[in-house]
Amino acid sequence: MSRIAKKPITIPPKTEASFSGGVMTIKGPLGTLSKTFRPYINVVIENGAITLTPNVTSLQSRALWGTYASHIKNMIAGVNKAYEKKLVVEGIGFKADIKGTTLALALGFSHPINMPIPADLKVTSEKNTITVSGIDCEKVGQFAAVVRALKKPEPYLGKGIRYSDEVIRRKQGKKAA
């Protein structure tokens, strides 16, 4: 049983929510988000709150109950305040630049890496810090993870791309005899 989904989700002011045909739509000051839900869960919007209840008592409906509640909470939070991830590019000669709608990265490879920036995300780069922001939690996290995966931080010198709040456990390396 989901403890998260048992509580009704309150809709803040300046935010509208609608559910029809299996599609949940949230409109807020920063934009609109839509997500398709399976018919295992009933979604009821009344009195400024969203209530979720499972249709059938099955393993899949119980699993989706809390998941859908979390998705709705993330959508409501995103249209009111944008999500943001910060990445730190660390290493000699490593740099990140924004060129139009692409993120140009120099990461010690023989060639620069150009990544297209999705239209609904805002990416800025200054002093080896890349900031990814947007209203969709999943897209912000996915783009940040893809950028980080290009050059993961290594444990000896700490070179690579890491999240700003990530701690890299450093190894000692070779000792001189």
Image: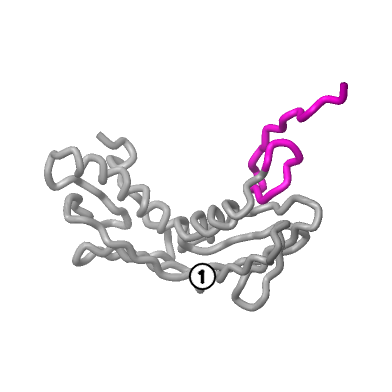
Is residue 168 magenta-colored? yes
Q: Position of residue 164 (x, y in %)?
A: 67, 47
Where does the image place residue 54, in percent across and percent down from the top left? 18, 45
Q: Is 101 situated above or below 168?
A: below
Seen at 67% across and 37% down, the residue is 168
Residue 16 appears in the picture as rendered: no
Give residue 112's position: percent from left, percent from top: 68, 66
Q: Nearer the viewer, residue 42 or 131?
A: 131
- Compared with residue 10, is residue 20 higher up or lower down, i.e. above or below? below
Q: In this view, does 95 lie to the left or right of 145?
A: right
Can you see residue 27?
yes
Residue farthest to the left, as pictured: 56
| Position of the C terminus by quadrant | top right
The answer to whether residue 15 is above or below residue 175 is below
**Viewer-proximal residue among 92 and 14:** 92
The residue most toward the front is 177
Mark 1 highlights which residue? 118
Residue 156 sits inside the magenta stretch: yes
Pick the front one: 17 or 90: 90
Residue 131 percent coordinates (x, y): 64, 60
Q: Which residue is rendered at x = 68% and y = 41% of the image? A: 154
The quadrant of the image that shows the N terminus is top left
* Magenta range: 154-177
> Which residue is pictured at 58% across the width and 57% down the height?
147
Q: How crowded is mark 1: few (under 14 residues within 10 Å), some or many (20 or more)?
A: few
Q: Determine the image quadrant of residue 102.
A: bottom right
Kind of residue sitting beneath label 1: Pro
Looking at the image, residue 122 sits to the left or right of residue 26; the answer is right
Picture quadrant of residue 36: bottom left
> In this rendering, is residue 172 above or below 163?
above
